[in-house]
Amino acid sequence: MAEIQPVRGWRYTAELSAHIDDYVSPLFDVVSQKQREALYRNELNSIHLSVPRGEDPAGAALARLLEWQQTGVLRQDELPGIYVYYQYFRLPGSSREYCRKGFMCHIRAYDWSENVVLRHENTLPAAVNDRAELLARTQFQSSATHGLYRDDDFELERYLDEAMQDPLYQTEEDYQGARDVLAVIQDARVIRRFQQVLSRREVILADGHHRYEGSLAYRQARMLAEPNSTGQEPWNFHLMYLTNAAADDLRILPTHRLLLELPGGISDAEFLAQLEPYFSLLSMDDAYDLPERIAGKQWAFGLYLNGLAYKLRLRPEVHEQLDWDTTPEVKNLDLTVLHFFVLEKALGIVGPDAQRAWSGVAYVRTFSECLARVDRQEARAALIVNEVTMEEVERVCHSGAVMPPKSTFFYPKTIGGFLFTSIRDDEHDHAFYAPHLAPDSGL
């Protein structure tokens, strides 16, 4: 199963790490234009490596990286380690503080066909090419993708907690309101225990499909160019943040659908009439009650249309009409039901490919934003959904299928610039890596 390796992390020098909030950045696919402009003004912010700009962005990132390494902005740790990464956060409307526990390391960049790293969504080729080009030029990874392994015994958490007694640094509060804390494990015997546990596990890719596929593309190119490679070269590996799928602090937030238009210029009344054959519709007095009224109910949705709120629930007998060529696990998802019976049957956007290409739908995480945009007439309607569960993600991944677009929003996101790793050819010149050592039988 999954092969992981410790890394000699590159990190901001101690003086800069004392103010790490100034140098971390959101992931490339969630950073807003306003955030980007503010971050670019800081000449040492990690966004210059993760989302470079200019006529030759990858070349600009490489030049910046070499400058930072030569001037000591970034320094490499002497010993390889597994980097413990905790994120403390609260959810809107809740006083509970969650702590998502995980660790960062290198994982072999497995092809999807090997069924070791499993995906749950499709990617856009242009975004993959962008990430692959940046990786090929810099051979440097500025943000970890997020992977999930399942360990119901929570065996590794005690080592993570021990490491957190002596953190390297932490943010006060990142862009999403989380507090991020970094520590490191450099005990070779403990590291080999991590390797042994993961060697019996599959990994579900929770977040970072484009960056992971960028690593796959780069690895494939290097393998073609170097047919005598051993498989242990650094470019065979990818930086990943691994968390336990069994943990209660692993949170997935819903992503609602905002209908920017109704195809064919249909009226609100016509839209409701076209929903009637498939859904029972219940008018509601207060739109802000929608999330509570649909919570925990299968195939139930909220609809906000021209200031009026409705609870929709699929008529069970019509579910068998869902004839998309996918697995039963995907057909049972709320979002598959929504996309098939609302977008295809009621609105005439036929098939997953046409729906992905349709410009009339937007994906919005915040419930209040959905209502506000309809009220401002920026959208015709909002479709409010429940969150996907971790069990649903696992079932879909193990069925070999993928979910509808924007099905999951694992919260919080990891941040860029907290830890960097290199995949240069000389990166494994350390006694821990050579010769490659199999995990011990135990501690």
Image (cartoon, rainbow, N blue to C red):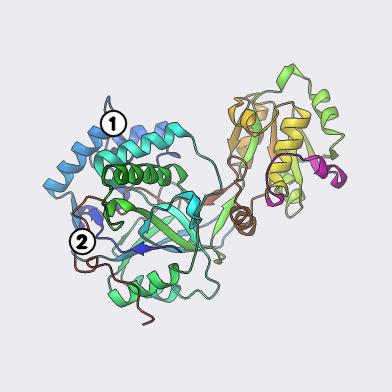
Q: Residues within 10 Å of mark 1 (few under 14, many from 20)?
A: some
Front-lying residue, 326 or 208: 326
Q: Secondary structure at mark 1?
A: helix
Could you tell which of marks 1 and 2 lies nearer the N-terminus? Answer: 1
| Residue 158 picture location, percent across and down | 43, 76
Q: Secondary structure at mark 2?
A: loop
| Residue 116 picture location, percent across and down | 48, 58
The residue lying furthest to the top in this view is 265
Residue type of the residue flagged with mark 1: Pro
Give the residue at x 44% y 50%.
111
- Look at the image and say whether residue 321 sits in the magenta stretch: yes
Where residue 257 is drawn, which disc sits there? none
Where residue 57 is drawn, which disc sits there? 1
Contact between labelled residues 2 and 1, with CB atoms less than 8 Å apart: no
Q: Which residues are magenta?
A: 311-329
- Look at the image and say whether residue 374 sits in the magenta stretch: no
Q: Which residue is mark 2?
A: 77
The residue lying furthest to the left in this view is 71
